[in-house]
Amino acid sequence: MISFFANLFGYLLNFLYNIIQNYGMAIILFSIIVKIILLPITIKQQKTMKKSAKVQEELKVLQVKYKNNQEALQREMMDLYKREKMNPFSGCVSAIIQIILLFSVFYLVRSPLTYMKKVDTELINTYTTEINEQAENRDAYPEIAIIREKAAGDERVYINMEFFGLDLSSIPSKDFSEWKTYVIPVLYVITTFISMKVTTSMQKKSKKGKLLTDGQDKEEPEEINVMEQTNRNMTYMMPIIAVSVSLIAPLGLALYWLTNNVLMIGERVILNAVIKDKEEKVDA
């Protein structure tokens, strides 16, 4: 399934590349288009998450109230889901769809000769074997290695990887002496940190607003502290993971992650504001 969508998205990326003749710009435009395609799913997922947070608070009250009566608890839980018109598994379905599509794009950007250029598999295998025989270790991104080492002599595997003075086929861990290879990974790490901060900030405001509204600010301070500590740990752990990944990934792949991060930050801020505004109008 992932290969199917990667192949499908490959036609779009190749179409954009043929117009622009620049892989980096094609990736940026492609990322924007994919975000737009996924927007209905994202909106539904964010609405479900907000409703789920509200339902979870009410579930905690029911669990305390009926802690010694599991049958009554199950009945009240089902009534709650019906009253809120919420399917407990609806969020999972949209999340799974989004994950499949995102992994498909990852496959596409990681293997552009297969999914974008539609290069013959036999030719890719031949070049991969040649490169592996010459190298001490197998390359983790064989198709990027083919573009880097064979494109000059074979138009069939050529992709213009020049992007504002950067070679998108470069891998930072293999080019330690070239400072420019760190520009995109550094920006990727910064946007990852910002993305985590934006997400945790929204969750904190939502939680705080809910507690103040319900008058429960004195009942759950320990829970809030645990949640905030977990969010704080994640805020610092994610950039560390991002550093590790971006240093061993080709810059073309890192550029896709960077672009996706920037779009995701804007998307979360805008959608949160729009959904919150609609909720306030409904409550009013």
Image (cartoon, rainbow, N blue to C red):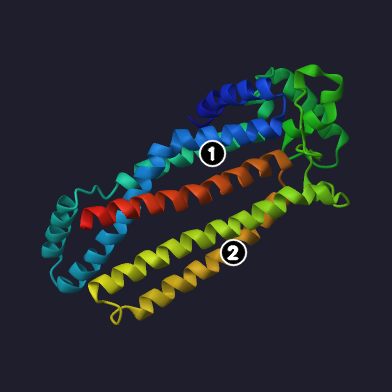
Please tell me which residue lies in front, 282 or 10.
Answer: 282
Residue pictured at 67% horizontal, 42% vertical = 255
Where is residue 103 drawn, in percent x and y? Answer: 54, 38
Element at badge 2? helix
In this rendering, is residue 214 above or below 1?
below
Amino acid type of the residue that numbered disc 1 sits on in the rendered structure = Phe
Say whether disc 2 or disc 1 marks the residue closer to the N-terminus: 1
In this rendering, is residue 32 above or below 270?
above
Query: Which residue is labeled 1 in the image?
Result: 103
Camera sees residue 97: no
Query: Within the image, what quadrant is residue 135 found in?
Result: top right
The crowd level at tag 1 (other Cα within 10 Å; few <14, some 14-19, many 20+) is some
| Left or right: 282 as drawn, with respect to 248 | left
Where is residue 249 drawn, in percent x and y? Answer: 71, 45
Where is residue 277 drawn, in percent x and y? Answer: 33, 53
Camera sees residue 110: yes
Where is residue 165 drawn, in percent x and y? Answer: 81, 39
In the image, which disc is placed on residue 237? Answer: 2
Element at badge 1? helix
| Left or right: 19 as drawn, with respect to 54 | right
Image quarter of the C terminus: bottom left
Residue pictured at 52% horizontal, 32% vertical = 33
| Left or right: 20 as drawn, with respect to 162 | left
The crowd level at tag 2 (other Cα within 10 Å; few <14, some 14-19, many 20+) is few
Query: Within the image, what quadrant is residue 115 found in?
Result: top right
In the image, which disc is placed on residue 92? Answer: none
Amino acid type of the residue that numbered disc 2 sits on in the rendered structure = Met
Disc 2/disc 1 C-alpha distance (Å): 22 Å
